[in-house]
Image (cartoon, helix red, strand yellow):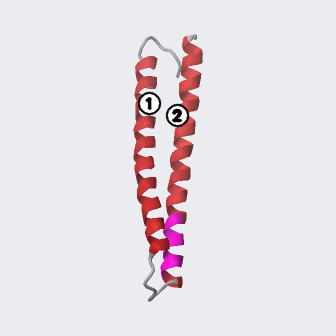
């Protein structure tokens, strides 16, 4: 693989990771809204299973968000190091 191909693929990966982070943030907002609606609908009910499931999903999404951010940071580090090898890419 040429240096140009490497840079292109890394830039594409970074773009996908950035988009994933945007989608995760949007999903988190949707989960928050769903939780509020469930809580309002079941106000006073003893079964909070649905709200607990949404809470669990939100916590898992937080973990995914951290992992994606770490991956994006690693890819950015690789891009920076690769660019420092003699002007490969912009």
Is 14 one of the magenta-colored residues? no
* Residue occupying the point 43% across, 62% down: 56
Q: What element carries label 1?
A: helix
- For marks 1 and 2, the one nearer the N-term is 2
Q: Which of 2 and 43 is in front in this view?
A: 43
| In this rendering, position of residue 89 left or right of residue 46 | right
Residue at label 1? Answer: 76
| 26, above or below 44, in the image | above
- The Cα atoms of the two marked residues, 1 and 2, are separated by 7 Å
Residue at label 2? Answer: 14
Q: Nearer the viewer, residue 73 or 27?
A: 27
Spot occupied by residue 15 in the image (x, y as percentages of width and height): 56, 36
Spot occupied by residue 20 in the image (x, y as percentages of width and height): 54, 45
User: Pointer 2: residues within 10 angstroms few (<14), some, or many (20+)?
Assistant: some
* Residue occupying the point 40% across, 38% down: 70
Q: Are marks 1 and 2 in contact (CB under 8 Å)?
A: yes
Q: What element carries label 2?
A: helix
Spot occupied by residue 82 in the image (x, y as percentages of width and height): 45, 18
Predominant secondary structure, magenta span: helix
| 10, above or below 42, in the image | above
* Residue occupying the point 52% across, 52% down: 24
Spot occupied by residue 26 in the image (x, y as percentages of width and height): 54, 58
Residue interval drawn in magenta:
31-39
Residue 2 occupies quadrant: top right
């Amino acid at each position: 693989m040429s240096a140009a191909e490497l840079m292109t693929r890394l830039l594409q990966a970074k773009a996908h990771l950035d988009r994933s982070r945007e989608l995760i943030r949007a999903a988190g907002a949707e989960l928050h809204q769903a939780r509020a609606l469930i809580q309002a609908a079941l106000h006073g009910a003893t079964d909070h299973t649905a709200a607990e499931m949404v809470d669990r999903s939100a916590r898992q999404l937080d973990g995914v968000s951290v992992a994606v951010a770490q991956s994006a940071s690693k890819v950015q580090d690789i891009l920076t190091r690769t660019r420092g090898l003699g002007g490969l890419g912009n």
